[in-house]
Image (spheres, coloured by chain):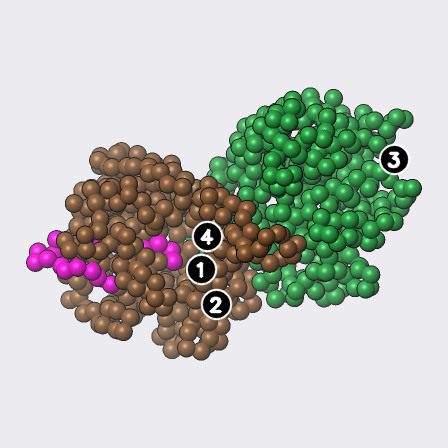
Chain colours: A green, B brown
């Protein structure tokens, strides 16, 4: 019998009655899954679309973020009359486990009565998906009309297809990859080392330092540096040049000092600092670890095509020509594996100057592709 | 009258009698320039080649590093019978000002009797070259047979051509650029913020904490993170995949923890930590700043070709096809500007899987190009 979701001020939260089994061999008791829904589930429960968020995303895909007050992160894609049309579809988005927006993560209370910190189990992309399956079960939905995700969201969509392929009719994977490359791991490791090098990280035990807000009192400086490094990988060299070039920030000449003379410096510093207001450093460690561990072929005997033999889902893959984090070649590898497993697949490389972040930005071509696929 | 170099246990050091004027408008008194020479200067002093080192390089181009004991950083290029043949040429390499291997930098003693720290003036690539000109003067050399450099060394070679073009017969610029891009600045800014976020940086005032060694007691954690981030930019995605892929480090399975499970993590951690043994964090701040400020066109009225109108030097440019830090397009921009200024130029893009670092590694094509140009 599925447990019943509970409404909290921050939105509905599902509490799992049973421990969630994890890839590590451990299991996680008392799992909470915070989520949002948009639109209405139809009578035969056939119009549900699950949207999977990226590394630092959350469930607020089409409604304001409760901390920053900013609009949902994909309002250009999800809403009434939008490419993922909430007048027609019941859209679900849940915060991944390991994160810090209401789902169980390192800042959650452990059975000991103190926050988990680094005693939280290391999770995988498949573990995140297991939690989503439990949520879909609790909502009484047998089969999703589609699972959709960009970046780490795309990894989850791939994992749904590979591990719960009979529970989805379609998978839309945008700007993603079937495995983290050495360079991907390297950038994440820089971020983790930046956090762990901050004395305020304190082995992950910093939650009591910040009073009410678990994000305060922690390794904010290290987390900001981690975000800065990651942010560079989300943008293309071309996009940075167009947006900032070597333009100076509110000054006519170089200051011959270490202030943010260049606009790009000022922008990065702001991105780093503002990130610490909304994200937990330990969650950043756990989620980047899950991404680095992701290798769908390895999970299925070393052959990527074998990951897709248990599903009859339709597939659509989208990459962006200036994305150097998960370049088009990664999507092509997935397309070839899907073809080898006998699946038809739509695969499009779209043009955009904005690198990996293109999937979040205005792009008419992407709108058309999504609308055409989510039919 | 040129001052006389003085021999120290770490090699010769030139002390300038006059303050060195700087681009900032300040000047630096008591400048010391540590250098090495190889081979013999001929009677008419026409066989001198200046080699300019990169960001974290030093004067020990072809002789062991006094701290690490490792061989000189370019022994495959410089030595008897090598492409830059010390049986024929008198090779000079000096530590750039701002660095920490014997030339004046933030760890040097200021007139106050304490180390400069952040009171050291912000310097530019042209300021580094001004110090080299003073050294060449002191050695009694009117004109260099060639100035040679890779990466930041290439920027110095370009600056020689632009500002002291009548003092060189030839310039060889490898894997370099005429200006730092927004992405280049962004990566450096991450490194600087990592250092400055380390509480042990202490506003640059940490030299008294380490006892004998000014590198100890400082922001080693921050400097290690800075080095890790930079190191990724020196290698290509392809090179990282070939060298490390997703291979595990001394284990058969993932540990579901935050140790260095992957070889790439272990490698990066080692690169970061070992760097702190040989480099001063404040020097890292100052030299990255000099590189970010570098824009040869801006220095010459906004038109790169105008930078090269005052020289009759021969030019050779080399880029590597997998270098994404200073990609081939940057060398092509320089080649076009040289052509526009009426200079013939040899320009070659060489193939190598190893990204920006290729200029330091075994590459027969590079050997042939260098040997053919330095004739």
Q: Name the residue under label 2.
A: B204
Asked whether the residues under marks 2 and 1 belong to the same chain, the reply is: yes
Residue B306 lies, with reference to residue B268, above or below; the image says above
Asked whether the residues under marks 1 and 4 belong to the same chain, the reply is: yes
Q: Main secondary structure of the magenta part?
A: loop
Parent chain of label 2: B
Label 1 vs 4, first from the N-terminus: 4
Separation of marks 2 and 4 at Cα, in angstroms: 23 Å
In the rendered image, residue B287, in percent from the top left (x then y), is placed at 40, 57
Q: Mark 3 points at which residue?
A: A140
A255 vs A62, left or right, is left
B26 vs B372, left or right, is right
CB atoms at circles 1 and 4 under 8 Å apart?
no
Parent chain of label 3: A
Q: Mark 1 points at which residue?
A: B285
CB atoms at circles 3 and 1 under 8 Å apart?
no
Q: Can residue B258 be seen in this view?
A: yes
Label 2 vs 1, first from the N-terminus: 2
Quadrant into which the C terminus of chain A falls: top right
- Residue at x 39% of width, y 63% of height: B121
Asked whether the residues under marks 4 and 3 belong to the same chain, the reply is: no
Residue A84 lies, with reference to residue B208, above or below; the image says above
- Residue at x 37% of width, y 66% of height: B68
In the rendered image, residue B174, in percent from the top left (x then y), is placed at 31, 45
Mark drawn on residue A178: none
Quadrant of residue B354 in the image? top left
Helix, strand or loop at mark 4? helix
Helix, strand or loop at mark 1? helix
- Queried whether the magenta region covers residue B51, the answer comes back as yes
Q: Give the range drawn in magenta.
A: B36-56
């Amino acid at each position: 019998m599925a447990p019943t979701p509970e409404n909290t001020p921050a939105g509905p939260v599902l509490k799992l009655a049973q421990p969630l089994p994890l890839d590590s061999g451990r299991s996680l008791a008392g799992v909470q899954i915070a989520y949002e829904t948009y639109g209405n589930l139809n009578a035969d429960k056939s119009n549900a679309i699950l949207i999977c968020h990226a590394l630092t995303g959350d469930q607020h895909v089409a409604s304001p973020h409760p901390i920053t007050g900013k609009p949902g992160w994909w309002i250009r894609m999800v809403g009434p009359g939008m490419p993922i049309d909430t007048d027609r579809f019941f859209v679900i988005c849940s915060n991944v486990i390991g994160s810090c927006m209401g789902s169980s993560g390192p800042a959650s209370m452990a059975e000991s009565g103190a926050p988990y910190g680094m005693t939280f189990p290391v999770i995988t992309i498949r573990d995140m998906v297991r939690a989503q399956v439990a949520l879909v079960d609790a909502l009484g939905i047998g089969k999703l009309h589609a699972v959709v995700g960009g970046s780490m969201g795309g990894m989850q969509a791939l994992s749904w297809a590979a591990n719960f392929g009979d529970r989805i009719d379609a998978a839309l994977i945008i700007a993603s990859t079937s495995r983290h490359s050495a360079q991907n791991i390297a950038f994440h490791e820089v971020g983790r080392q930046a956090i762990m090098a901050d004395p305020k990280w304190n082995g992950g035990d910093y939650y009591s330092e910040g009073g009410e807000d678990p994000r305060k009192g922690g390794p904010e400086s290290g987390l900001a540096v981690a975000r800065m490094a990651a942010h560079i990988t989300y943008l293309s060299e071309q996009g940075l040049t167009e947006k900032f070039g070597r333009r100076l920030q509110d000054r006519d000449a170089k200051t011959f000092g270490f202030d943010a003379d260049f606009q790009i410096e000022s922008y990065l510093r702001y991105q780093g600092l503002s990130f610490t207001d909304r994200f937990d450093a330990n969650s950043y460690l756990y989620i980047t670890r899950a991404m680095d561990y992701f290798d769908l072929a390895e999970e299925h005997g070393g052959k990527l095509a074998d990951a897709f033999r248990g599903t009859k889902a339709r597939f659509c893959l989208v990459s962006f020509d200036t994305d150097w984090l998960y370049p088009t070649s990664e999507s092509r590898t997935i397309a070839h594996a899907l073809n080898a497993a006998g699946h038809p697949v739509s695969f499009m490389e779209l043009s955009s100057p904005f690198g990996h972040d293109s999937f979040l930005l205005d792009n008419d071509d992407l709108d058309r592709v999504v609308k055409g696929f989510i039919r």
